[in-house]
Image (cartoon, helix red, strand yellow):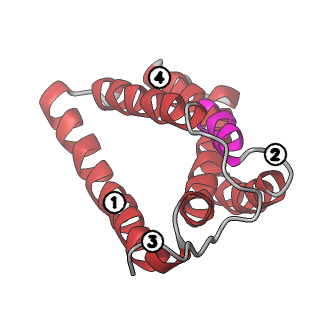
Amino acid sequence: MFGGAAFAGRIVTGYFVDRFFAPYVIAVLFAGATLAMVILAAQSTGHLAYLAAVLMGLGVGAEADVMPYLVSRYFDIRTLGELFGYVFSSYTLGVAVGPLLMGAGFDATGSYRLPLIVFTVALIAAIASSVTLPRYARGGLHVYPNAGH
């Protein structure tokens, strides 16, 4: 369910960021992932656990697609490659370290609740950051002639 939702999340995100302000789209999808974390931290089972898997999958599918989109909207095309490299490296680091932190949290407390709460707080910070982003120029990928290059 998670994998299918992550796949669908990529398509859904692409559809919606073409029609709506991308930071709001990602905020909604991250809100779903936040709800998933709360459901999992509450140790829910059955249908709620499946719902959490779908919501988390949609959020994971969204984040990978919205990164290059937002970088292309907020920064000059001449810096796009470098900046996306930084953003994607941060994403990759999170993907690598997240499971380690989950395991360390479980080893320390005997439960996944604490790491899930920490990740929930991080998602709330990401949502807050997203909704405060300024409007970007419609087309993105600007080349500014006097940008010092």
N-terminal-most mark, 2 or 3? 2
> Amino acid under label 1?
Ser
Q: How far apart are marks 1 and 3 (CA)?
A: 26 Å
Position of residue 94 measured from the top left corner of the image (x, y, whole percent): 33, 54
Q: Distance between the residues labelled 2 and 3?
A: 29 Å
Q: Distance between the residues labelled 4 and 3?
A: 52 Å
Number of numbered discs on residues: 4
Residue at 40% in and 62% down = 87
Residue 104 left/right relative to 116: left
Say which residue label 2 marks. 20
Residue 147's disc is: 3
N-terminal-most mark, 4 or 3? 4
> Amino acid under label 4?
Gln
> Amino acid under label 3?
Ala
Helix, strand or loop status at disc 4:
loop
Give the number of the mark in front: 2 or 3.
3
Give the number of the mark in front: 1 or 3.
3
Residue 123's disc is: none
Rendering quarter of residue 64: bottom right
Q: How far apart are marks 1 and 2 (CA)?
A: 26 Å
N-terminal-most mark, 2 or 4? 2
Residue 90's disc is: 1
